[in-house]
Image (spheres, rainbow, N blue to C red):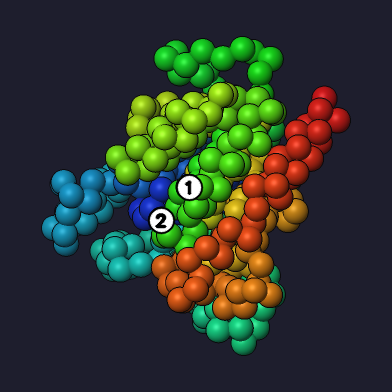
Amino acid sequence: MANKNPHILVIRLSSLGDVAMTVPVIQSLQAQNPRVKITVVTKHAFVPLFHHLHGGVTVHPFFPQGQHKGILGLWRLTKELRALNITAIADLHSVLRSKILKLMMLNYHWESVVKDRKEKRNTVAKRQFKPLRTMHERYADVFRKMGFKLDLSKGLLGSIKMQIPAVLKFNSTERLIGLAPFAGYPGKTYPIDLTKLLVQKLERFGKVLLFGGGEKETSALKQVEAQSENAICVAGIFELSEEIKLISNLDVMVAMDSSNAHMAAMLGVDVISIWGVTHPFLGFAPFGQPESNNLVADRKTFPKIPTSVYGNKMPDGYERAIATVTPEMIEDLVEKRLKHHRNQL
């Protein structure tokens, strides 16, 4: 990019997990291109995902049910964005809303993410079955097309530990193991009976913190907590900003194919991800994690996996496919990762 002090507008408006996936890419972009100024447009509820970033990264909140609702609202948003003196726009969303914004701001240099839905459909249909380009690399490609150097293999600049919310008190020497058994769809959610067994196994490593959201999930995790000796349900207690601080202090996060996995990964936390009817080959594995940290359901028994890109389709008989990733398998991997941490100290 010719401008010596570029100001890039980054558009990412969708779900919590999707926005969290962009954070390490944006952090890497700024670290490797310190002269660039970055403004991220995202839903106002997701602004805390970027609070730990420094050095030229700001957030412009998007209010889809407020002043930015509908076509008139998007027009108001464009007027706000034009006032920021941006030099180029990176569309990491590439859906109807962002395409409408592009029509309203055609006089700017735009680059958009290439999602390659055909490749994903072919993987789901088993016409091909190989690892696709990760979404993190697809996001990075947008900035590369703008002329920026961006190497994601360098990873994050170490883990980011923030102050634990004051309402929780832990022994400073105690390990903290996160467990987030829920996901957006049943086929990606760990069964509650196995969650109870898993908590019993993980308690020997340290304090187990149970993450979730909503009344139903919180109620289920409260029941798990009641039957455990060293587990705490933290679901329903914190705002997103405080939950991020807590996650940053975990030694390991065990999560499904869900937003909790991506939030932990963006903070440099070791993430063990459990895959039910989805599969990491589709490019949605957490950032910077070794491939061995992905525990995948048994595809010999359940050959239709992945049943869809996002896990919203579940054939008959696949309801407990994720149960082929046993509590013992997860326990063994947690132990290996904790030993790996000790060896690095």
Residue 74 in which image quadrant: bottom left
Identify the residue at image location x=30%, y=40%: 215
Residue 340: assigned label? none
Identify the residue at image location x=40%, y=32%: 222
Q: Amino acid at mark 1?
A: Ile
Task: Tell me, yes or no, if residue 249 can be seen here.
Answer: no
**Left or right of 320: which side holds 217?**
left
Q: Where does the image place residue 299, in percent across and percent down from the top left?
A: 65, 72
Q: Amino acid at mark 2?
A: Gly
Q: Is residue 137 above or below residue 203?
A: below
Q: Where does the image place residue 309, in percent across and percent down from the top left?
A: 49, 70
Q: Where does the image place residue 323, in percent across and percent down from the top left?
A: 58, 58
Q: Is residue 88 above or below residue 30?
A: below
Q: Please tell me how crowded label 1 is: few (under 14), some (14-19), or many (20+) other residues with Cα within 10 Å.
A: some
**Helix, strand or loop status at disc 1:** helix
Q: CA distance from mark 1 to mark 2?
A: 15 Å
For the residue pair 162 and 75, the one nearer the viewer reads as: 162
Q: Earlier in the sequence, mark 1 or mark 2?
A: 2
For the residue pair 18 and 145, the one nearer the viewer reads as: 18
**Helix, strand or loop status at disc 2:** loop
Residue that label 2 marks: 184
Q: Is residue 199 above or below residue 22?
A: above
Q: Nearer the viewer, mark 1 or mark 2?
A: 1
Residue that label 1 marks: 192
**Left or right of 36: which side holds 337?**
right
Identify the residue at image location x=28%, y=46%: 62
Residue 101 in which image quadrant: bottom left
> Which quadrant would the C terminus be assigned to in this image?
top right
Q: Please tell me how crowded label 2 is: few (under 14), some (14-19), or many (20+) other residues with Cα within 10 Å.
A: some
For the residue pair 187 and 21, the one nearer the viewer reads as: 187
